[in-house]
Image: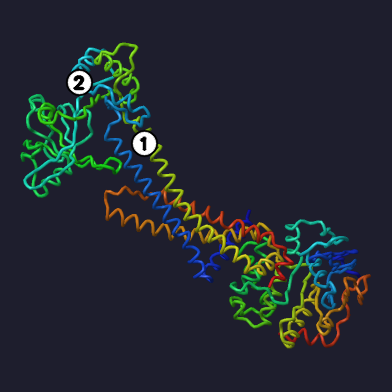
Amino acid sequence: MKRFAYELNESWKIGVAQMRSNKTRSILTALGVIIGIVAVTLMGTAIAGIQVGFDKSMAIFGDDVLYVSQWPWKPVDDWWNFRDRKKIKTEYAEPINRIIAATPNSNLVIAVPTSSLLRSVKYGQSEVSNVLIRGTVSDYLITSTFEFKEGRFFNDVESRGGANVCVIGYDVADALFPSESPIEKSVLINGQPFRVVGVISRQGTFLGLFSLDSIVVMPLPAFQKYFSAKSDSDILVKVKDKNRVAEARDELTGVMRRVRGLPPEKKDDFSINEQQALKSTLDPIKNSIAIAGLFVTGLSLFVGAIGIMNITFVSVKERTREIGTRKALGARRRTILLQFLIESTSLCLVGGLIGLGIAYVMCTGIGKAFPSFPIRFSLGLVLVSMAVSILTGLFSGFAPAWSASRLDPVAALRYE
Amino acid sequence: MSSPIIIDIENITKDYVMGEEIVHALRGVSLEIRSNEYLAIMGPSGSGKSTLMNMLGCLDTPSSGRYEFNGRDVSAMSDDELAAIRNREIGFVFQTFNLLPRADSLRNVELPLVYAGIDPETRRERSASVLREVGLGDRLHHKPNELSGGQRQRVAIARALVNDPSIILADEPTGNLDSKTGEEIMGLFEDLYRRGHTIILVTHEADIACHARRTVRLRDGLIESDDGDLGGVGIVPIEGPLEADATAYR
């Protein structure tokens, strides 16, 4: 054991000396590993960032809210069966709530109708297009997770009366009111003025695809008065206990069948969606992106590893006589194997550290330049990168080190 | 009064396959070498002396025959067992010195001790003391390229001595040196011999071989002549010129 430690120490010294004496060669060879580690590390940070963004996006939906919709939140093969379903109507909310109230120990809390479409919003000369206009009731707050930057949500009276009031998302406020408060100002949607009573604080994007802050929420009666055509409606149902979503889901299915008056032999003509189902649909996509990304960047690391392997073979060739001498002086096979393994590994480790440093600087730079870009640099990533560098060194050094350890001492000593 | 046998070779042969034909480098050599002998192995190139040296140095194993080193059968040992024997029992001195170019004298001499698993402190002490013995006390931290040829060979001799081996095996130790430096190195060997070391010289130069007390001549893979008494040579009387050589290097 002690001897092993001495040999290890000796090998490390030789490795460092070797790197020093062949600076240019070592740097050029390590460059492959540096680039590989930079690529893999950046990809790792991006994947971690995507994961965080994904979780954040999912949280928007709430893990205790069920969505009654026409379409399920997953790809379907028989889309025609869903196309012909009856639309979900906002009026369902009322009978659903009545049934919930009448059910003892119901797993459901409340049903909230929503209806949405895309329109432009104007204020003075400014205009924002493709804003999600959503009509709902004041109880919408119960099912959502957002907070207010300014002002408030519309109240019960405004909700029932269908007052021309609205709450606007962060992006809309930012675009239309860059230098003033939007509260009590009137924005124009479809030529109709709506008084702003609140601004929702920043929600970010959904999977980086579209902004969740480009939204205007208004009382449902007002929405129906001006935008009823071509809108899509959902019913949001809050669940009492998020650990019993499955039971709540079954209960809601029964309720919806009653509301729709479906006879027992007929299939459901609606879909009940939840965050978890969406997650399990999107997870494989996210994972395959991660795997593909790591594979491609892993290839660059592999090329770097081949460079190390090549230079280690050269090093073995150049130092054949030295290997012979060492063997004559009593170096065992293991010692020689270890020496070259450590040489290649230390080269990879140095390359990996440099690569990690570069990746860190790049990450910080990207983070500063694009704050919304999901990128995460973590200690775990550093450890993984180091482990990958070491493994790369062992992998690429093994074949040359093995061939060195097998050299015949007589032939090695005679080698010119 | 005969000293113990270190090397006992009986009828060893070594065959190589070279291309299509088989080369019989050794055709049946028997040799006994005792402790504190000073022996020269001579012969023209192709006589098998390098092959015999490789056998004696446990760098290679014979095709047939028996080889006992300090009573242990070497001919059937594994690579790693042979490495251990080389490390502890044999000190090599090469024609081309074979020092590690980037290591200083001390680290070069330390190397066999590293492989023997000696702790760093003892390693340092022993290496420094052996270097002082060969007259390089003031060159401990010089790298080979900062030393003269004679000094390099002395570092190599120190390296051969550091593990206190049973034999010192020197392959043309003066081949790369001018004659004056060569004589100095031979003086050093003479001194080592007088202190009780066992020395085997492999050379084709008669004026180098004449420093030895016993000469074994090889020709065509066989021993042509052996002027030593196989019954036990021991210490032979010291001759005049050698005395001078022994002190010349100081």
Image quarter of residue A285:
top left
The x and y percentages for residue A109 are 24, 21
- Mark 1 chain: A
Question: Dot 2 falls on which chain?
Answer: A
Tell me if residue B212 comes above or below residue A13 in the rendering: below
Q: Of the residues under marks 2 and 1, which one precedes in the sequence?
A: 2
Looking at the rendered structure, the secondary structure element under dot 2 is helix
With B41 as the anchor, is B150 left or right in this view? left
Out of A231 and A330, give the one closest to the viewer. Answer: A231
Instruction: Give the residue displayed 22% in from the left and 17% down from the top.
Output: A96
Q: Position of residue B16 (x, y in %)?
A: 81, 65
Q: Viewed as shown, does residue A20 lie left or right of A225? A: right
Above or below residue B65? Residue A166 is above
Q: Nearer the viewer, residue B145 or B218?
A: B218
Residue B168 placement (x, y as % from top left)? 77, 71
Vertical side of A126 occupied by B183: above or below = below
From the image, tell me which residue sits under label 1.
Answer: A282
Horizontal side of B182 relative to B114 (left or right) equals right
Query: Residue type at mark 1?
Result: Leu
**Residue at numbered disc 2:** A93
Determine whether B66 is above or below A227 in the image.
below
Residue at image x 29%, y 27%?
A: A71
